[in-house]
């Protein structure tokens, strides 16, 4: 063994109460157990040294942490119980203390395989290398924001920051997967080596180490009476509970509160060293009746972090308190004199503010921070101040259902099961109440989704790591439309009561228990009951307000049309039912909505205007366009003088003219005329009339975005888009596939970001390329020159440059 282990750490191990008890019990028949424990602890000690090479931020997972966990185990167990523990129990307690975090130290080969995610053409050494790469790829795919940030850093040449971000991502992946990795490392390096009297307990050690990062309720699934013969047993849940509590009572760095890190870079920063100072195990008083943390805090962020952490520990204590009661009862039935006791709450009386030399506190601690007035924020976010049209509630419900169905489709495809997504929108009367109902057979919800996403304003499941990881695992290639996490509250713009029946699909042939949720008003608590739904999916019913029901005065036909307008290009069948009528829309419905169908009388036939009809189905855009070009003698021109005549009235000469010209988003006729007023005075004036003006209809992933792409410049708000092209066109498109746009919260405006700039350039390219393919070389060269001279849009010009004749 290495000198530093023999000289420093082995004596610490030998002085521990658990090790002493083990040594005493193994003196005669089981002396080789001591050598096994020494070797295993040394292995974990050496492996732990490598943690810092990949996880600089997590230096808390060192040998000191492991010894602190061992020491806290002894505090929780108490000497009288330690004396009663069996040899295998003592073995597993010591080994789990030292092995539970070895997953924080992956093999270098494994780390190098992960980092190939950033190689252009990764090469794999073997299948193990490829499997490790694929696992990290799923994790990384679940963090598109980090991927975008990394690309931006590389593009800007900020390579040092890019490497730091990569290191952070590797660290986070290690942290999230360390329990599973610990189990794998144990099975690989210690399989059949952890033995007591010819009974292999390596698997049990791996299970215990894995369990410390899992749901506490699963601890009771472990064997309570693992027998070794001769009345020697091991209670595995007892060991797992003690490990779990000891790990977290060391203020495990895996769970350091975010409030601390929010203060690392502010005006008065809090250092990690300050936090570490308060983590020392000697700050704890642990006994069967008291768990108390002693801290003299130098900064309110430190105190807030400690108190927040104590809240987290309270939850673990409460859960484990119930579990240990079951274990104690089992020990009593088995005749074992072992009873573990601990309080279910941390005593916080010794968490205080450090005082100065005048015996005055360095700060006044209050749990005061920014809070939101829920009613006012909801009114701001969901009221007409932001959303305007209360019919937005329908759009929110439909897009939630579409996302749920697309996610389930990806899951069912992975499981190789047939599945047909379907949504039904109903409007009907029930006992004098108007009901709007949206039903889907999508992935559904369980209590976890409801608690962490559905009920939390601003926390969208479809923007979470949980969703992106699931999407990557199932190879889902859709972009969710529900992303702001505030949409469901929009239902209370039109309804006082929200009723949800839901059931979540987990995996092939397994789903959650059905739930029924009733919410009466945005301030109401969720009334959750056992539901009756038999198949996965969700039904949402809105009991509509009589004075805020936007569909109340609609005819059945108009209700169907209003729903159709919200979903012009749904990815699958959506049924619509009113009180008397029903129909459905699907992807074929969008084919009937063409640019030609949107023409008004200003787009009537004109001998001087040629209209090009264009079908678009490339680069993540489907739809059509009608483009008007001014022509004279079969060639494109910017202006045509139709008539010009000079007349003489009372010795004064007047010129009467009429011309037609093409400008930004419009073709207009301009006339110079004369008129005479009541006094007989002659006046010349100009008049303009529209021949063709641009208009648009756009949807994103099948959901309408009710905005005008061709608005006047004075209508455009900062950061909102406006197309200004050198000709008029009617544009009907759906942005689909993996293409996306950034929208404002109510989904009524497209924001001017790189996504839009890229789309506008691609649209210009596709439309101009189609025109070029329809005309002669001479025609195109003249038109191209006109467009280049007239356009002020960089996106349009960039798209025009990409056009190749006969492409």
Image: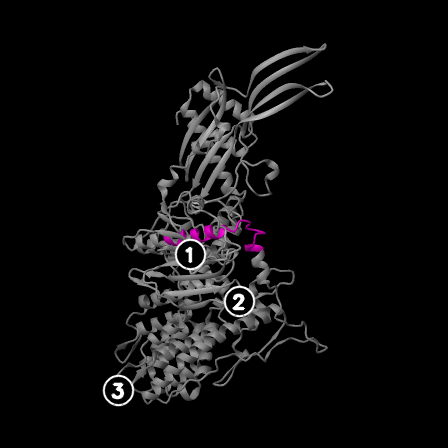
Quadrant of the snapshot with the C terminus: top left
Does residue 54 appear in this view? no
Task: Identify residue for label 3.
Answer: 230
Would residue 508 be found to the left or right of residue 256 on screen? left
Task: Identify residue for label 1.
Answer: 429
Residue 774 locus on image (x, y percent)? 41, 24
**Gap in Å between the C-alphas at discs 1 and 3?**
73 Å
Does residue 32 appear in this view? yes
Q: Secondary structure at mark 1?
A: strand
Q: Residues within 10 Å of mark 2 (few under 14, many from 20)?
A: some
Towards the viewer: 25 or 705: 705
Q: Which residues are magenta?
A: 380-405
Would residue 199 be found to the left or right of residue 618 on screen? left
Relative to 451, does residue 767 appear above or below in the rendering? above
Residue 1 locus on image (x, y percent)? 39, 72
Residue 649 locus on image (x, y percent)? 69, 11
Which badge, 2 or 1, is on the more N-terminal residue? 2
């Amino acid at each position: 063994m290495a000198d530093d282990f023999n000289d420093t750490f082995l004596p610490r191990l030998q002085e521990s109460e658990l090790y002493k008890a083990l040594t005493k019990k193994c003196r005669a028949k089981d002396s080789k157990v001591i050598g096994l424990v020494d070797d295993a602890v040394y292995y974990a000690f050496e492996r732990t040294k490598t943690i810092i090479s990949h996880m600089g931020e997590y230096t808390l997972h060192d040998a000191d942490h492991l010894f602190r966990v061992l020491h806290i185990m002894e505090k929780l167990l108490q000497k009288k119980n330690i004396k009663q523990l069996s040899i295998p129990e003592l073995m597993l307690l010591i080994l789990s203390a030292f092995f539970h975090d070895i997953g924080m130290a992956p093999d270098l080969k494994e780390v190098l395989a992960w980092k190939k995610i950033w190689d252009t053409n990764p090469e794999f050494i073997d299948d193990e290398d490829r499997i490790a790469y694929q696992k990290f790829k799923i994790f990384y795919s679940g963090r598109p924001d980090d991927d975008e940030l990394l690309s931006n850093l590389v593009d800007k040449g900020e390579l040092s920051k890019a490497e730091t971000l990569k290191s952070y991502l590797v660290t986070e992946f290690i942290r999230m997967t360390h329990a599973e990795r610990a189990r794998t490392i144990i099975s690989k390096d210690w399989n059949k080596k952890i033995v007591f009297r010819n009974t292999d307990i390596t698997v049990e050690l791996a299970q215990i180490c894995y369990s410390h990062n899992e749901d506490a309720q699963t601890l009771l699934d472990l064997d309570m009476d693992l027998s070794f013969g001769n009345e020697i047993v091991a209670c595995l849940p007892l060991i797992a509970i003690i490990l779990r509590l000891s790990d977290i009572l060391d203020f495990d760095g895996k769970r350091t509160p975010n409030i601390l890190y929010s203060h690392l870079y502010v005006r008065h920063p809090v250092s990690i060293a300050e936090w570490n100072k308060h983590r020392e195990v000697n700050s704890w008083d642990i006994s069967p009746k008291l768990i108390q943390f002693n801290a003299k805090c130098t900064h309110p962020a430190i105190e807030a972090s400690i108190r927040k952490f104590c809240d987290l520990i309270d939850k673990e204590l409460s859960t484990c308190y119930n579990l240990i009661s079951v274990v104690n009862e089992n020990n009593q039935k088995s005749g074992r004199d072992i009873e573990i006791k601990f309080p279910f709450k941390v005593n916080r009386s010794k968490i205080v503010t450090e005082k100065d030399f005048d015996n005055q506190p360095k700060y006044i601690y209050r749990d005061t921070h920014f809070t939101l007035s829920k009613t006012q924020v909801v009114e701001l976010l969901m009221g007409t101040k932001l959303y305007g049209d209360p019919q937005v509630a329908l759009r929110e419900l439909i897009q939630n259902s579409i996302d749920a169905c697309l996610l389930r489709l990806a899951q069912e495809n992975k499981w190789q099961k047939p599945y047909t997504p379907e949504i039904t929108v109903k409007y009907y009367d029930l006992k004098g109440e108007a009901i709007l109902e949206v039903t889907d057979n999508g992935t559904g919800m369980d209590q976890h989704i409801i608690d962490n996403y559905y009920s939390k304003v601003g926390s969208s499941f479809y923007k979470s790591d949980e969703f992106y990881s699931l999407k990557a695992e199932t190879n889902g290639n859709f972009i969710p439309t529900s992303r702001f996490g505030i949409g469901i509250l929009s239902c209370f713009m039109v309804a006082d009561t929200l009723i949800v029946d839901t059931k979540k699909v987990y995996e092939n042939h397994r789903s959650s228990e059905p739930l029924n949720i009733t919410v009466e008003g945005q301030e109401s608590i969720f009334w959750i009951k056992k539901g009756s739904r038999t198949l996965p999916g969700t039904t949402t019913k809105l009991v509509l307000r009589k004075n805020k029901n936007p569909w109340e005065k609609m005819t059945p036909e108009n209700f169907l049309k209003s729903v159709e307008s919200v979903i012009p290009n749904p990815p699958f069948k959506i049924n619509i039912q009113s009180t008397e009528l029903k129909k459905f829309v699907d992807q074929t419905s969008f084919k009937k909505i063409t640019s030609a169908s949107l023409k008004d009388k200003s787009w009537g036939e004109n001998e001087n205007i040629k209209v090009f009809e264009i079908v678009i189905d490339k680069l993540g855009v489907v739809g059509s366009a009608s483009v008007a070009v001014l022509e004279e003698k079969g060639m494109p021109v910017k202006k045509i003088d139709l008539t010009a005549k000079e007349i003489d009235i009372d010795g004064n000469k007047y010129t009467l003219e009429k011309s037609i010209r093409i400008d930004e988003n419009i073709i207009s006729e301009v006339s110079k005329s004369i008129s005479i007023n009541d006094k007989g005075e002659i006046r010349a004036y100009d008049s303009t009339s529209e021949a063709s003006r641009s208009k648009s209809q756009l949807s994103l992933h099948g959901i309408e975005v009710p905005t005008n792409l061709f608005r006047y410049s004075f209508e455009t708000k900062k950061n909102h888009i406006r197309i200004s092209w050198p000709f008029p066109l009617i544009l009907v498109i759906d942005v689909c596939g993996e293409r996306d746009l950034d929208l404002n919260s109510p989904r009524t405006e497209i924001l001017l970001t790189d996504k839009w700039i890229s789309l506008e350039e691609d649209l210009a390219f596709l439309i101009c390329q189609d025109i070029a393919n329809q005309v002669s070389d001479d025609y195109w060269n003249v038109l191209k020159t006109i467009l280049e001279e007239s356009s002020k849009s960089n996106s349009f010009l960039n798209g025009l440059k990409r056009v190749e004749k006969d492409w």
